[in-house]
Image (cartoon, coloured by chain):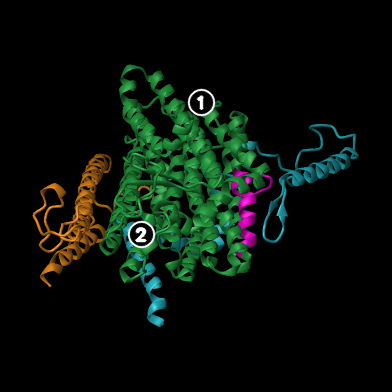
Amino acid sequence: MVLETTGGYWSPILWLVAFTVAFLIAYIIWGMGEKKYKKGEQVKPFLSGLKEPPKEQVHVKAGNIYWGFTETLKGYYDFMKKIHTGIVNDYVLWFIGMAAIFFVVIIIPEVIK
Amino acid sequence: MNWLLMHSSALLIAIPLFAAFLAPLIDRVNKKAMNVFVIAVLIITQIIMMILAWDVFTGITHVYVMGASNPAAAIPAQAAVPVRIVFEVDGMGAFMGLISTTISLAAAFYSIAFVKKETGQGRYYTLLLLMVVGMIGMEFTGDIFNLFVFLEILSISSAGLIAFRFYHGDAVEGAFKYIVISSLGALMVLFSIGLLYGQYNLLNMAALASVMKYTVLDKIALALLVAAFAMKCGAVPMHMWTPDAYTIAPAPITAMLVVASQVSLYALFRVCFTLYGMTLNLTTIGIIIIALGLLSMFVGVTMALPQKDIKRLMSYHAISQTGYMLLGVGVGLYLLGQSDFDTYGMKAMEGGIFHIINHAMYKGLLFLTAGAIFYRIGTRNLNEMGGLAHSMKCTTVFFIIGALAIAGIPPFNGFASKLLIYESAYHVSPILSIIAMLVSIITLASFVKVFHSAFMGPPMEGVEAREVPKSMLLGMSILTAGIILFGLFPDIVVSNIVHPAVQALADQAGYINSVIGGV
Amino acid sequence: MIYNLPFFAVALLIAVGMYAIIFRRNLIKIAIGIILVESGVNLFLITLGYREGGVAPIYTNLPPGIEIPGGMALPVPQALTLTSIVIGVAVTALILSFIMRIYRHYGTLDSRKIRRLKE
């Protein structure tokens, strides 16, 4: 049940046991919490006194997730968009170019020798 | 039983090939009968493959000589020219064969409902079975020219299937790009076969490997072969066709295309380890493959993050995961022949090879869930989705399992193979492991995005999203069962399936000896 | 020198074909480029089988005084070329039918305009 890796081992069964134990402990702690909670009363978020908008309006669309990440790496992404042209000629050019590069890299150790 | 085992490698080609051309005929009579027929053929193929693999994994290399009175006999030592057509199934070939048949079976189950409304189903299944033939042929062949033939069978049938929904313009566009780039790649393979044949008058891989001199012409051939197969497996920067083709193919075909890419990966490893082997300048080739792996991992995952099309996002992840396999096996190739190989190199290759089967399963599953979403709501755009978890509960569970597996969250199968790669790549250079882990984190991040925008949130308006038909669920649950089992018992899988495959790949002399009998 | 002529032809065919695939924008011309590369590779294969003064490799019909197998033209490259030609026909047919479909959907054959799938 133990997968030997070079520097250690990995046992999913052991991991599951540990996970279950941790979950039980967390559950017990959670069970010791406040009992007087009433549903629907304390869950309304406080938005500076404004009314909470309906769920449909606050759902973040896929295009907006990780906006910050792509904005930070704008240079990288612009470059990537530039090379992903979608033109079939360019695809072939990349392929031939890489074949040439491989050949040069393979032949270089001989030349240096 | 003995007869079946002896002829199994030929039967695995013959049965799907014969069935492929029978399927449209049966389709004329009865559609249901054809579905049953195709599934039955694929189940039989799977059973034969398992019997063969069971035997091969005990350490026996199967050799099958076409047309010989005793097909198991290798090439006679006194023959002047070894021109016989040979199938050679070693651990690696059987391992890849198992992947191909399993994913094809799941894809065929899924297809029953998925293409129900389309016309030309008979031809769809013909091409699907031809893809199986091409994949198994590439894995089993011991002859470098047949490698080219099966590569072309695979490319042509894949291109036909990518364009299956030809009434969408972009489906034909993707298929056109695919066939142009892959036929050019195959021609380069053929050219390098010609270069090798011109020098040695040999086409048999084992015989070629035994006389390989690594001349300048061999180096040109190597560069072309590595470029062509790396392109076909979608390594950056020759990956651009991958998202185009994967996105517009029908979902079960995309799952099979993932395996088709991995078969090209297999061919790449076969060329490096078996055909050239120790004559190579191993450091250079190892560095090339590691560099391709790192580039694929990083570019693939960063390009996946901002995608809005769900299948395009997953296609970029397929590229990035291919990088892990290239990294793992590249580290092995880099260390081959050094004293470190038996410890770190072996483990790295085990990680890389184990990742192939893991990736085939979870990426297949993810593409199938994407297809299920497309089947119900008719769009692949993530911005137009939302709240599918309310109505498609099984699909949601399958998606979560697939997403956790691809991100390498324990206890699913992706973690075990990634751990092997991280730990052994660390010994070559810590930077490799750091990049690999970073990529894993971004992978998780982008699947959180998919999960959030497709499944969470309020239900969609105006679209009636229900659970998908049973046959699609069956196809997905086959793969899910595999993911969970492989996740819980990685040690059994590694020692029984992956280790024989790695040993077969690393043992060039064994491969040569089993064909030409110690010449 | 004269025996190397076919190899120059091979290089020329492949180079012209590559040029067409990489720099021509018309899809039909790209298809022609692929066919040219394929012809080049086929010519290369068939040239490999040539033996100076070789006879047809039929054992039962062998003229006396021919050594085996040195004096015979190699049969294998011809089989390879035949296979490769057949595959080439299939690929060409597939590419041309795709081009036809693309023209129907996009109304153009310019590869720069056929890029709905990108990034």
As helix, strand or loop, the secondary structure at mark 1 comes to: helix
Viewed as shown, does residue B340 lie left or right of C70? right
Name the residue nearer the viewer: B176 or B99. B99
Viewed as shown, does residue B487 lie left or right of B143? right
Q: Colour of chain C?
A: orange
Quarter of the image with the N terminus of chain A in it: top right
Magenta stretch in the rendered image:
B403-425
The amino acid beneath tag 1 is: Ser
Indicate whether residue B447 is drawn in magenta.
no
Q: Can you give x and y, in whole percent of width and height, for residue B277 in the image?
A: 44, 63
Q: Which residue is mark 1?
A: B471
Provide the major secondary structure of the magenta segment: helix
Q: Which residue is mark 2?
A: B208
Indicate whether residue B405 is drawn in magenta.
yes
Q: Earlier in the sequence, mark 1 or mark 2?
A: 2
Q: Can you give x and y, in whole percent of width and height, for residue B396 in the image?
A: 60, 35
Residue for point 31% across, 29% down = B21
